Amino acid sequence: MKGRTLRVALPGREYDIEIRRGALDALPSKCAELMPKARRVFVATDTTVGGIYGERAVASLENAGYKVRLHAVPAGEESKSPEMLRELWEDMMSFGFTRSDAVVALGGGVVGDLAGFAAATALRGVDFIQVPTTLLAQVDSSVGGKVGIDLKAGKNLAGAFWQPKAVLIDPECLETLNDKIFSDGMAEVIKYGCIRDAGLFGRLAALGGRAGVMDEIEEIIYTCCDIKRALVMEDERDTGARMVLNFGHTLGHAYELAGGYKKWTHGQAVAAGMVSASRVGAALGVTPCDIETQIRSILKEYKLPEVIECPPEIMREAVSVDKKSSGAAVKLILLKKLGEAEIFPIDRERFLSLASAAQGGAE
Ligand code: NAD
Ligand code: GLY
């Protein structure tokens, strides 16, 4: 199948996002094309993805003449840790990895962020390819070069901007996802509709669920990656335009923290965060009141939570380590209308009081 390609044209760090059924099998040819000196390929994955796709990836690379090391971390957010990063570094070195060799991140956002950070830092930076296998990773985390790990103080607090040499997206990998993880990715897909593409939002509402989305999956992934690509090209370092990607994330991070990163997945937390952000936006007179209803309705269709309880002290803790906070100000992302987001700086105390009120009033 032909598939579709998008170019992330960052000067000196340009790369393609290829979206194609069966793209996983193009890994050896991509390594040869983009990293012609590589002899070793270090494939980082997690135990679940490694069990499903690891052998296929390793066999195709070995058949092409590469020495391959498959390293599987335990599946789950806990693996985005300094301990796992160190294990990756050590295993790369014991494998005889050199600066001209290649890292492949085969998995969801956890593997992409962790292995990308290992690639950014091992031997002061080596090339890597993202092969995202969750919907969330295919539409969001594999594109744009944000890599990193979590610290005790919060998520993604150590990391780098390190762009991949390519993003290979194989929508067939989504077929093995369970419904919860698929829905999780839908939260980010819905977010793109909210911030940049009212047409996408309407289309998703009409598709009504996973089966409908899978019928149009290549086009949907393409649309989302195109939006992200444009924002990354405009603002690679996340100091301006790119911040709109964080719609629903400020309170989303608080909800993840409130659930100890176990009760709620990232996508579920972002879903409820988008509802809260709409309520806060309405209270500030920025967001039309009917947007909350529209977002709630689409979240129901995709089995995502609309409300997550969060104690005020957890909200305060999460907002104070949020990377969009500076001094006493928080940069909120609010919708002016469906398909149009804006950055709205607000005093942190005022935001916390509005967010608590929005929470209290949620049915
Ligand atoms: P994940 O990587 O933990 O994957 C979720 C689960 O799905 C895991 O258990 C995994 O083993 C399993 N899985 C993955 N692919 C599968 C497949 N094809 N079939 C069956 N099971 C499969 O979670 P995620 O939702 O992909 O990513 C979440 C992470 O992404 C968070 O750490 C978040 O902070 C990060 N993130 C990063 C960015 C960025 O720009 N770097 C953006 C958004 C989110
Ligand atoms: N997921 C937010 C970003 O990449 O900027």
Image (cartoon, rainbow, N blue to C red):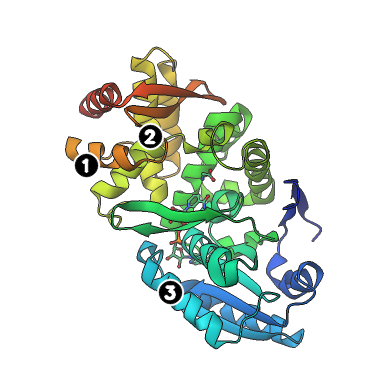
Residue 252 drawn at (x, y percent): 36, 41
* Residue ID for mark 1: 314
Amino acid type assigned to the residue bearing label 3 in the image: Arg
Residue closest to the eye, 63 or 216:
63
Per the image, label 3 sits on a secondary structure element best described as helix
Mark 2 and mark 3: Cα distance apart in space:
29 Å
- First reached walking from the N terminus: tag 2 or tag 3: 3
Where in the figure is residue 235, as x and y percent of width and height?
62, 37
Density class for disc 1 (Cα within 10 Å; few <14, some 14-19, many ≥20) is: some
Question: Can the viewer see residue 113 in this picture?
Answer: yes
- The residue positioned 27% from the left and 22% from the top of the image is 354
Classify 10 Å Cα crowding around label 2: few (below 14), some (14-19), many (20 and above): some
Q: Earlier in the sequence, mark 3 or mark 1?
A: 3
Q: Secondary structure at mark 2?
A: strand
Crowding near pointer 3: few (<14 within 10 Å), some, many (20+)?
few
Judging by the rendered image, the residue that carries numbered circle 2 is: 325
Residue in the image at 73% along x and 59% along y: 20
Q: As displayed, is residue 141 above or below residue 205? A: below
Q: Position of residue 122 (x, y in %)?
A: 55, 71
Which amino acid lies under the numbered mark 1 shown in the image of this protein?
Ile
Answer left or right for 257 relative to 244: left
For the residue labelled by badge 1, is the local secondary structure a helix, a strand or a loop? helix
Name the residue tied to disc 3. Answer: 86
